[in-house]
Image (tube, helix red, strand yellow):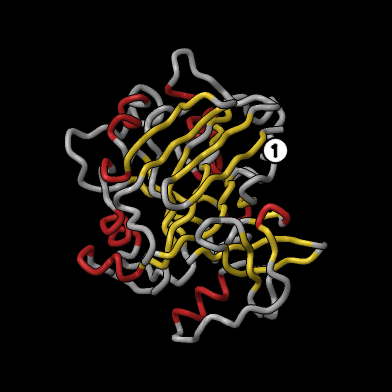
Amino acid sequence: MRLASWNWGGRDYVGTISPDGREATPLGVRDASRGALPLIQALADGEPLPPPSGTRLPAELVTLRSPLPRPLRSIFCVGRNYRAHAAELAGTVFRAAMPETDPWPIVFGKLGECVIGPRDAVRLPPPSVSVQIDYESELAVVIGRGGRDIPASRAMDHVFGYTVVNDVTARDVQMRHQQWDLGKSFDTFCPMGPWIVTADELDGRATRVRGWVNGALRQDGQTRDMIFDIPTLIETCSRGITLHPGDVIATGTPSGVGMGQNPPQWLRSGDVVRIEIDGVGVIENRFE
């Protein structure tokens, strides 16, 4: 199943997308402004999906919103989770975090208010704030069943599904503050979508993540190459912290980010970043 949120005729809807991605079917919900979040929460409580209600439309006619326009809270994000990406930033972002072994994931937060839709424009900050804007193509895990101290052996039972995010980053701000939340959380810095694909249709542990800038392929990685796999990330994020239905964990980015180019390639006004994850879908955002 693919759960999506969209706008059509000036109204918000939430519903399902057909397996071929061509048809959008709205569901009978009272408030569609929160996207799929209330549906995920209701399913976790054992309630059924609401029935279809409204006009079934060609997906190309609707404006897709983020499936979670305002996530439940800040997004859990994972840094340095592909070895090639760790190597390309070993002298910059990760110079103080390159152990010989990998005992723990790096986890930070990204404010949920920075989430935008799969084709919305990303707003560049003025040069006085940042001149080093970068992209990060990532698979995001959406939690379906909550819990605390979830062991890795049972972690996949807590996955509702998967979506695509671009963990847009102001690298100079990230480096300046020696922590990552500020440089990751500028308004519009988290394109998400195009929908959520449920876990019964995709195993996020075995899929492909790719990212293009202005049509040129920059990132191409397999999630099986993660340093810390999805069960380990869920176990880590739930240690002493209760995860709730609708929580989002962004699992890290493959190599090929702008900062890793020689010389670095920062995003400029007019650039377009396209991210595709096999089995999930595509987001494409213009930077303005």
Q: Which residue is mark 1?
A: 123
Image position, residue 64 (x, y; %): 66, 55
Residue occupying image coordinates x 50% and y 49%: 281
Tell which residue pokes out farthest to the right in this image.
10
Q: In which image quadrant can residue 236 be found?
A: bottom left
Q: In which image quadrant can residue 97 be found?
A: top left
Q: In which image quadrant can residue 86 be found?
A: top left
**The one of 192 and 100 positioned closer to us in this rendering:** 192
In this rendering, would 1 be left or right of 152?
right
Tell which residue pokes out farthest to the top in this image.
263
Q: Is residue 187 above or below residue 96?
A: below
- The number of numbered discs placed on residues in the rendered structure image is 1
**The one of 49 and 169 positioned closer to us in this rendering:** 49
Residue occupying image coordinates x 49% and y 67%: 246
Residue occupying image coordinates x 52% and y 24%: 216
Q: Is residue 8 above or below residue 253?
A: below
Question: For the residue carrying disc 1, how many other residues have a C-alpha within 10 Å: few (<14), some (14-19), or many (20+)?
Answer: some
Image position, residue 158 (x, y; %): 34, 70
